[in-house]
Structures are given as structure tokens and as C-alpha cells.
Amino acid sequence: MFRQHFYTVYLCCASFVIGGSMPLSLHAQSKLDSLQRLDEVMVTASHLSKEVIPVQQLSGAQLQRLSSYSVADAIRYFSGVQIKDYGGVGGLKTVNIRSMGTNHVGVFYDGIELGNAQNGTVDLGRFSLDNMEAITLYNGQKSNIFQSAKDFGSAGSIYLQSRVPEFAEDETHKVKATFKTGSFGTVNPALVWDKKLNSNVSSSLSAEYMYSTGKYKFTYRVDDSYDTTAVRRNGDVNAFRLEGGLFGKMKTGYWRAKAYFYRSERGYPGAVVKNKFSHEDRQWDTNTFVQGSYKKDFAGRYSLLVNAKYAYDYLHYLADPKRDESLMYVNNHYYQHEMYVSVANRYTILPVWDVNLSTDYQFNLLNADLTDFVYPRRHTQLVALATAFNFSQVKMQASILGTFVQDHAKSNSAADNKTEWTPAVIVSYQPFRHIDFNLRAFYKRIFRMPTLNDLYYTFVGNTELDPEYTNQYNVGITYAKNVADKGLRRIEVQADVYYNEVENKIVAMPTSNFFRWTMVNLGKVEIRGIDVALQTDWQWGNDWYLTGRVNYTYQKAQDFTDSGDSYYGGQIPYIPWHSGSAILNLNWRRWEANYSFIYTGERYSSRANIPANYVLPWYTSDFSISRKLFFSKGELKLALEVNNIFNQQYEVVICYPMPGTNFKFITQYTF
């Protein structure tokens, strides 16, 4: 059936993804660039950043200690984030910030955006936490005007910062070998090798292999009771990642170069519907890119930042009725090429006044072996003009982004050229000089282009689509205080109230033939929300350290598409009214313990907010304990993780059961 083909191919483009445009629908200005390394502190928790824009970050040891398989799992601990998880290690995961839609989230790796012009998805499972220094989430945009034009182009941004090698004076190399195993038949070795080539140049090589059967037991609800036990199958993952980088220092600047390769084969377990527990869809991926950055300050006033990238992505999707008679035969191959270059120029007019002009160019090409495929090509030019004023108690930023898009197609007509100008204004005020209390506010308008699948997918695409637009309004506070008590040492809090609008929502609608769908602009969503984050640091004597982090989100995300619709004003699908998380990190000498908790409240699985579509709240508790030992000339770390301690049977997405209690054993040796 075409409907099944369409949903499966489109939604199953990655195992851990951020993005996707189908019907399931990331300061004060400084000469230091944001790519600098973030040093670990003894307490192992990163403080809430006092930036002009709302920001959340996990970094250093705190990031490494989370019971997470991927970057997508770690992002669950940020407020204002919704994760759709389709089950298991190999299940699809999509990330949505403040309910604006997954395609409105930009993902940046070492300062350069990751992209997928075909469907807007970015596979976060390709990026290992073992090689990650920090994950940072910005609402609106990063509060640093010295950046590429792309950085201004998303409603929310996630920045992945990989490690930059650092060496003691007498060190020339470092090696970290890790082996993880546990539930789901997981075998996960990884190796990181850092080498100091000379006083100004170092290199890093990171390799990782991941295998998992993806099998786990779950209980299946029938007539409001759990009475069937089954095994989740076809969730296996077999993946290999290889990553190499060169890092250079120079007077008043630096340069970076990175090469990346990832290949995987995986199955998709599918939905549990009408007592069908197994599916046989398969997917093969190859992703590779090379990218580089060059940043230098000249004469104290002018700074230059150049980024460049080439990426190639291959996807093979197979649905074979010989393996599963319920499937329609699909054997599709997709080939993507992307070329990108950016130049950012910052000039300091006065010590308190900076301006920046950034220009980007991007080319995307998509080939496939689908019938009547139109072979689209997309040229995108961006120009961003930004300014920042930094006074002792007031910080102000403003920017305007121009986006120019031209599409070409081998056959049929291409979409019209698009030209859009979108502004942003940011203000921060510290009322009291000697109290770390700040008020902040921002407004931003931004849009997202329809993906190539939205416009050109065979029998589905609609070249008349308009972009989706968002308007964001945010006011918030941050407060921090150091305490001299023997127990509590520091407390930090940030809270934001926001209102967002999404216009011209792109959705899939059936045509006169139910087996044939098309993309249309339909819908207006209004989101009202509150994000609160609290962090505390504690210390007793010289041996005991405790950090606590709590996040809470309230969201009312309403669909105002059609005033005549009986569901007008209802909560949009899968957005809970209440959600939150908590993390506790305890250090005692060379022992470490970590407890993390995630809660997602009640919500609905459809626009119709009726009892039949009601989805129960769920929560999970994870615990880990580790011990560091001196061994030979290095350090040995042994760790045990227990996830979903209370074996809760739950579904993030209806009909996609999640794992119960599971374990992971970690051995890591660094020398």
C-alpha cells in the first residue's frame, strides 16, 4: 500500500534523528570564539550559562556519566524538549524544541551545521558521547554574533562540540579505550587516540563499533490490562564510525580540519498493531563528510571566520514481502551531495560595540532510483548582518537574515525562487551590579524551507508549498549565588516564559485516492510555555561532592487551524502539558554515582483530544555507579548502569513499546 510505503520510507530515515517533516507531524560578546574547550571542574557539573539567550548545556564528566546510548538520549534532560522514541536501541528518535516542529531545529557539529535537504533529518546516533565534550541547546539562536549566517537560521539550535586534544607539558599522546556490553546483546568497543604533532598542531582519531540485537521483552495492553508478553524484534543495529581531526593553533587564532565516516545496517521493529509484533523493514546508511574552520583576529578590531564542508549521504531502504507478507515491495536508493562555504567578518567599532557580516553558500543535490524522480538541485545563499552592544549592565543584540533559495529539477517544473528576510532582537539587563541576577528577553522570526521530499517526492510532493514561519517571544531571568556554607556551595536558577507561533504548517493530506497523498500548507499552532532549571552544588570536607539539576516544562500547544473544526484549540499530538527531569551526581574519592529521572505527563496521540487518543504519563529512573583505579601507567574505570530501574512498561509513541529494566557494563582505560 502506498500509504505504508510513504510513511515508512519518510519516517525511517535514521535510527536516532532530529528533524523530519512528515505528518507525525541553540552572552556577552568576547574575542574568544565559542569553539574553545570547556574544562572539567571537580564537581563534574556545568553551571547554567549566563547568556543573553536561554541556553542549557551538558558537558565534561556530567555528560559522560548519563545513562545514554546517543546524543538524542542525552538531550532528554533539557527542558522544553520533546522526544518521539519509536522503541529500542535502533528505534527512530525525533527531537522537537518548544513544540515548533522538528524541522525548525538546527544541529551544528563543531560549529558547522549538519544537514539533510531530502527530509530534514539528522541522525544523532552517528555521534558518540565518548568523543563529545559538550551538548548545548539554544532557544532562538546562539548569543554570539560572530558566527556563520546558518547559525541565525533556526528557531532552536543544538551544538555538538567534540573534544579538542589537550596535553600536559611532558605528554605527547593520549589513548582512551572503552568497551561496553549489556542488555540487547550489545557489543560496543571504542578507541580515541590523541597525538601531539608539535607545539601548535595536534591530531585525534576516534573509532567505534556498535552491535545490538535490539531484542527485549515487553507487555502488550489488551482491554486496558497488560496480559500479553512478547519480544521486540528487528531492532538490530550494526554500525561503524571513524573520525579523524587536525587541530592547529596560531597567534590570535586557530584552524580545525575533520574527516568523518559512518556506515550502518539496521532493522525497524515497527508498530505493535492488531497482535502483529514483528516487522522486517531494513535500512543501510553511509554518511561521510570533510569540514574545516579557520578563525583569526587581526589588529585587535577585525576578526575572520571561514567554514567549509563537503558531505555525501547514501541511504538504501528495503521492504521485502518475501520476509514479511504485510509489506509492499520497496527497494529504494538515495544519494545526497552537499557543498557549503561560509565567511563571517566581525569588526569592533568601539570596545562596547561590535558588528558582524556573514555570507554563506550551500548546494544540495539529490538522486534516487524512484519512478519519475525529478532529480532536484538546490542553491541557497544566506547573508546575516548583526550588531551587539555590551555595557556593564545592559547587553543588546540585533540581527537580520536574508535567505535566497533557487531550486532546479531535471523534469517537471521546480518550485519558485524564495527570498525571505527575518529579524531577531535580544536584550539582557543586570539591575544590581553586585548581585548575579539578570533579566532577558528576545523576539525572533524565522522560517524553514520545504524539504526536497516535501516538494518533489513522487506523487506526493507539492511545488506550490510555502515555507513554514515561526514567531518567538521570550522573557526570562537567571540568578546565581555562591554560598559559604559547609554544605551548599552554589545555587543557580533560570526561568523563561515564552509564546511561539507556527504558521503554514506543512502536513500530508490524502487526495481523491486514499492511497495517494500530497503535501499542503495547513495549520496554525500557538505555544505558551514555561521552562525552569535549577542547579545546586554541595561539598562536605575534601572528599564528598554532590550536584543536583532539575528541569521542568509546562506547555500549552494548541491547534488553531480551522475554527469550524470540532477539535479547534486542542493540544497538538504528543505534546505533554507537564514534563521534567532530574540529575544527581555524587563523588566520593574515586567513586562516582549518578541518578537520573525523566517524566513526561499526559498527552494525546492525535488532534482529537478524546479518551480514545489519551496517552498515559510515563517516567523512568536510571542509576549508574563507577570506580576509578590506577592500573599500570594509566587509569582504569569500571562502571555499571541500570536503566529503567522500576521496569516501567511504557510507550513514548503509541504502539511502540519501550524496553524495561536493562543493564550496561563499561570498562574504560586511559593512558
Image (cartoon, rainbow, N blue to C red):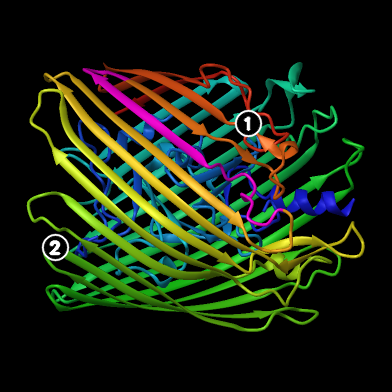
Question: Which label belongs to residue 185?
Answer: none
* Between marks 2 and 1 in the image, the one whose residue lies nearer the viewer: 1
Q: Mark 1 belongs to which amino acid?
A: Leu
Question: In the rendering, at what x and y percent does residue 616 appear?
Answer: 63, 31
- Residue name at image x 31 percent, y 54 percent: 476
In whole angstroms, how far apart are the C-alphas of marks 2 and 1? 46 Å
* Quarter of the rendering occupied by the C terminus: top left
> Image height check: is 141 above or below 670?
below
Q: Mark 2 and 1 residues: CB-CB less than 8 Å, in contact?
A: no
Spot occupied by residue 242 in the image (x, y as percentages of width and height): 50, 44
For the magenta stretch, what is the residue range? 567-592
- Please give the name of the residue rendered at 76% of the width and 36% of the height, measured from the top-left corner: 271
Residue 67 visible (yes or no):
no
- Identify residue type, mark 2: Gln
The answer to whether residue 401 is above or below residue 294 is: below
Compared across the picture, whether 293 is left or right of 12 comes to left
Badge number at residue 616: 1
* Residue at the image point whose x is 35% and y is 18% from the top: 626
Q: How would you rate the neighbour count of disc 1 (Cα within 10 Å): few for under 14, some for 14-19, many for 20 or more?
A: some
Using residue 458 as the reference point, say whether residue 50 is left or right of it. Answer: left
What residue did someone put label 2 on?
Answer: 393
Which of the 4 image quarters holds residue 222?
Answer: top right
The question of residue 593 being in magenta is answered with: no
Q: Earlier in the sequence, mark 2 or mark 1?
A: 2
Q: Position of residue 182 (x, y in %)?
A: 54, 19
Q: Give the structural element (helix, strand or loop) at label 2.
A: loop
Q: Is residue 582 covered in magenta?
A: yes
In the image, 544 versus 605, the foreground residue is 605
